[in-house]
Image: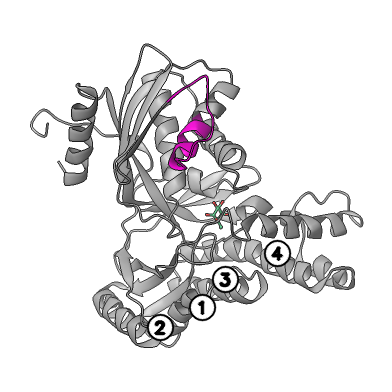
Amino acid sequence: MNSLLTAILETFKNSFGSEPALLVRSPGRINLIGEHTDYNMGFVLPAAIDREMIFAISPRPDQTCRTIAYNLNREETFTTDNLTKSDEKWTYYLKGVIDQIQKLGYEINGFDLVFGGNIPVGAGVSSSAALEAGLAFALNEIFKLGIPKMTLVQLCQRAENQFVGLNCGIMDMFASLMGETDSVIRLDCRSLEYEYFPFTQEEHVLVLCDTGVKHSLGTSEYNTRRQECERGVAILQAHKPSIQSLRDVDMALLLEHEAEFDPITFKRCKYMVGEIQRVVEACKDLQANDLEAFGQKMYETHDGLQHDYAVSCEELDFLVDQTRNNPSVLGARMMGGGFGGCTINLVKKEDADQFITEMTQAYKEGLNLDLVTHKVVIKKGTSRIEVTSEQA
Ligand code: GLA
């Protein structure tokens, strides 16, 4: 049994005096391409990874929720009928999920919970979605609610939108809950249809380079970007009422109406319309096993995020620039919401260690900063942990 799981179990037993009824793991996510497209009803290509949160949980006969955040060494007790915001921000994700389950008409009791994990926080790999997804999954199991997985995804998104206050799209929770081993998932964020694409990392691996710059999407420009996209939709809707999102817009139409846009809104929309199309093309590259072409599109995405969507930062741009003439790297770009966090790099497997060494050196020499890297393995989404008697 891994040490994290042992520590979570020990903490549970010491705090609550019994074994947990259920153990759940809930992973962070990467996204190969399709950034900020989810709330524009476009496509994304995420996967769940081997950085995860572990939950030890038991139902209670009353309404009390005793919750312990292992990594933070913090705890809070609250009741399901009084979900108010406290100073403990981490509880918002838990309370938001309970709130949404209740809003769907389910009555649930309280629970005892210890959770903790190894997902870097603020690094663009969605530790918050993993937290929401893990709790939603666990409550669905221990209270036998029978909520379908896609409904869990959607309620986690609403928890983040309504309780936490970040107007995020559906990608992160979707990836965390729906991930499959060695597969990336193309999700159509409009129809919610999805398709798994094998991604085995036999010859090429995915390496995350963490800038160490902690983004805080809530206070960042994330919600502003959403509004800018909506402004673009409103302009175009006046000409074509069937347009509901930037998914419904093609580049020709956008260019035709450029004069009606302020320059900022136009740039945002230009990136977005291009990116939605790019994911479709990138999936064809994947199907054709043309990772060179796929990697080029990752660079195009970064350029758009840097110059037109303006959600990058100096450290992210530096890390991407370092790879541009490196023959070991097929593609690189910033990943996630932006303003910090990680770059995702598609690297030839035999060169991966060398790549990590070079990037670490360059980051130190160029910006005098220490680089943290992660070779990620693509894993199954949120699921039960079965502990066998020999392990326990
Ligand atoms: C954050 C949000 C997602 C998505 C990405 C950008 O991770 O939570 O919904 O918008 O940013 O692609």
Q: Check disc 2 and give the amino acid type.
A: Leu
On residue 158, which mark appears?
none
Q: Mark 4 to mark 1: distance in Å?
A: 25 Å
Amino acid type, label 3: Thr
Residue 67 painted magenta: no
- Pick out the residue farthest to the left: 390
Disc 4 element: helix
Q: Whereabouts is ligand 1, in terms of quadrant?
A: bottom right
Amino acid at dot 4:
Val
Q: Which residue is mark 1?
A: 314
Q: Residue 71: horizontal and vertical position, in percent?
A: 30, 46
Instruction: Provide residue 196's location: percent of width, then percent of height.
Output: 46, 49
Of labels 3 and 2, earlier in sequence is 3
- At mark 3, the secondary structure is helix
Q: Which residue is mark 2?
A: 367
Identify the residue at image location x=30%, y=51%: 118
Q: Are marks 3 and 1 in contact (CB under 8 Å)?
A: no
Q: Which residue is mark 4?
A: 273
Q: Amino acid at mark 1?
A: Glu
Q: Quadrant of residue 358?
A: bottom left
Within 10 Å of disc 2 (Cα), the crowding (few <14, some 14-19, many 20+) is few
To which residue does mark 3 refer? 301
The residue at label 1 has a CB less than 8 Å from ligand 1 = no
Which region shows up in magenta?
78-97
Q: CA distance from mark 1 to mark 2?
A: 10 Å
